[in-house]
Amino acid sequence: MTVGRRSFLAGAGALGATPLLGATAAHATAAGAADGPAKKKVVTGAQALANTGWAALAGQKVGVFSNPTGILNDLSHIVDTMHASGKVNVVAVFGPEHGFRGSAQAGGSEGDHVDPRTGIMVYDAYGANAAKLETLYRKSGVETVVFDIQDVGARFYTYIWSMYEAMVAAAKTGAKFVVLDRPNPVGGYPAGPMLRPGFTSGVGKEEILQQHGMTVGELALLFNAEYLALDTGGPVVEDLQVIKVQGWKRDQLFAETGLPWVMPSPNMPTPDTALLYPGTCLFEATNFSEGRGTTRPFELIGAPYIDYRWAEALRTKEVPGIEFREAYFTPFISKNANKLCGGVQVHIADPHEVEPMLAATHMMVEAKRLYPEFAWRAENPPGRWIDLLTGSDRFRTMFAAGASAEEIVAAWRPETKAWAKRTEKYLLYKGPKR
């Protein structure tokens, strides 16, 4: 079922209760039942559309934004399956950060090239703005843009901003935009601070929450209704369609979906990584290693000057769902590469209770208290990256002033509540209230 902008806005208040989007529900339900045990009943938007023989894309010139996470039940990629079926005319593929096939590291891409498997032209969309994408849409003749990438639920994970720019370009060219929705792996509830004016960047192009608590399909509805007109000077995506996930609820974490986990990026190896990432990613802004170049990125955190005292101090803190273990590791890339680092491994004791930003804030406060070597990573001005990641200078200034972790976290609680209320009309999936 296609929901145009006008009809969506008119009926937005009922979205939380009525499955308006995704005409393939019957197919998805049948597929879910056939998949086996009860926990394997979740069906992605991609699989739901595939079950119809890609009917919604018939007769159109299609451009696909995707990466290795764009898979079906049989683990085949949607682009490969679309191409092999002969039912979808894929005229272009757009690769985000890390590339379409996922061969590039953080901050990298695969460049423009012809995909050797399908012969389809792949365009480098990492960091591409809407103007560049508009040119590529027109050049390749794209009439319908399909977006299918697994997000991890954090504002600074760049795929949602690739989608945003893709939507702006679609609005300007009049292209249809189809989101093949996937579960938010950390659940559908928001947490953390709001991005403030003056702190937009490639890791936060619009004012959303740090842990936004939405699926990419829900974000697409929000972007179209509230932000696109500001960037395009008027036009929005008139034909925006979200193919819903079937059988997923907001309180369901990825490990409970029965779906296979494909790494969305090289340093996101497990669903546990995704649970911690909205918090421990903040260590990117410090002279600590955030675990890149280890088998447990964003779980192993440390620096060459850290000793046992950090873990001991953290074990005295009450951090829901998390336990800390003293750990030593040597990252082979990124900060502190090939140097022995002392630190902690952040263990998840109860995934439904995890508060990653509270954990990371405690970790930073104790590191600053114990070690004079603690510092923001080298950049000009100092501390700019922590401002961009947290969405303002509040975290940095409170931290510098000696505020406790509880005080820092309490400062953004009202923003979290306001965001939850504001986004209710865009939510497509049910779940218990928080």
Image (cartoon, rainbow, N blue to C red):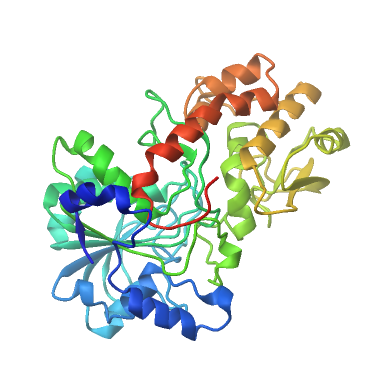
Q: Quadrant of the N terminus?
A: bottom left
The residue that appears at 55% across and 30% down in the rendered structure is 413
Instruction: Give the percent coordinates (x, y) of residue 214.
Output: 43, 50
Report whether residue 132 is seen.
Answer: no
Q: Quadrant of residue 123?
A: bottom left
275 relative position to 427: left or right: right
Q: Nearer the viewer, residue 165 or 181?
A: 181
The residue that appears at 30% across and 63% down in the rendered structure is 113
In the image, residue 387 above or below residue 281: above
The residue that appears at 40% across and 60% down in the rendered structure is 149
Q: Quadrant of the C terminus?
A: top right
Q: Nearer the viewer, residue 162 or 155?
A: 155
158 relative position to 364: left or right: left
Instruction: Give the percent coordinates (x, y) of residue 311.
Output: 83, 38
Q: Nearer the viewer, residue 420 or 253?
A: 420
Numbered disc total: 0
Instruction: Give the percent coordinates (x, y) of residue 411.
Output: 57, 24
Q: Quadrant of residue 284?
A: top right
376 relative position to 74: left or right: right
Report whether residue 141 is seen.
Answer: yes
In the image, residue 158 above or below residue 288: below
Instruction: Give the percent coordinates (x, y) of residue 159.
Output: 40, 51
Q: Nearer the viewer, residue 9 or 212?
A: 9
View extreme (top): residue: 401
